[in-house]
Amino acid sequence: MKRALFIGRFQPFHNGHLHVATALSKRFDEVIIGIGSSQEKNTSQNPFSYNERKNMISKALKANKIKNFKIYPIPDLYDDFKWTNHILKNLPKFDEAYSGNEWTIKCFKKHKIKVHKIKLIKGINSTKIRKMISNFGKWERLIPKEIAVWITRRHGAGELRKILTNKN
């Protein structure tokens, strides 16, 4: 069985992430989605909890008929070696890793893990989306519709903006 690890914070999971997950699901038997900073929540950089992100990702992938995935938490351990070893020990064995984060790529390369930098879609990134939400922008078009509906229902207009504008 060929497995890919797609790792990110997914704060929130957006159309660029969905594009990568879709492509990987066609190339690999299974896609392991590693949710980084899994212990973080309710901060301007990490507004969503691990369970919220897992729920969002599952909804979007299932709505797009992607079934060959599993989701795992990956906490911050603040040590490159311990963090990478945690992944290797606690997640299923994978053949290749994918990330848009330079630090993640560097950690994997140090351990001789085959890693690829994902191609970003111009104008779509989680930082921009969080800013758009906090500034009443049109963020909904940048994320899968299931997630936009879920965020709106779950957080309403004001609660998420309060978290995003709090400088924590």
Image: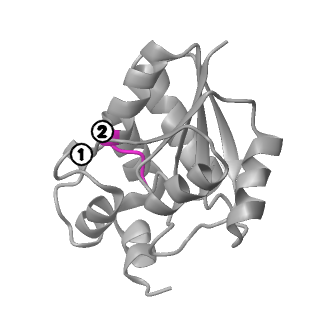
The reply to whether discs 2 and 1 touch (Cβ–Cβ < 8 Å) is: yes
Q: Quadrant of the N terminus?
A: top right
Q: Which residues are magenta?
A: 12-16
Residue at figure coordinates x 23%, y 50% from the top left: 124
Label 2: which secondary element: helix
Q: Specify whether residue 53 is painted magenta.
A: no
Horizontal relation, residue 66 to residue 144: left or right: right
Q: Quadrant of residue 135?
A: bottom left
Q: Nearer the viewer, residue 10 or 78?
A: 78
Dominant secondary structure of the residues highlighted in magenta in the image = loop
Q: Specify whether residue 13 is painted magenta.
A: yes
Residue type, label 1: Leu
Residue at figure coordinates x 32%, y 36% from the top left: 144
Residue at figure coordinates x 50%, y 66% from the top left: 47
Tell which residue pokes out farthest to the bottom in this image.
167
- Residue 27 image label: none
Residue 163 percent coordinates (x, y): 45, 75
Tell which residue pokes out farthest to the right in this image.
89
Label whose residue precedes the other's in the sequence (2 or 1): 2
Q: How much space separates mark 2 and mark 1, taking CA atoms?
A: 6 Å
Q: Quadrant of residue 139?
A: bottom left
Label 1: which secondary element: helix
- Residue 142 image label: 1
Q: Please name the residue that numbered disc 2 is placed on.
A: 15
Residue 103 percent coordinates (x, y): 51, 63
Q: Nearer the viewer, residue 75 or 108?
A: 108
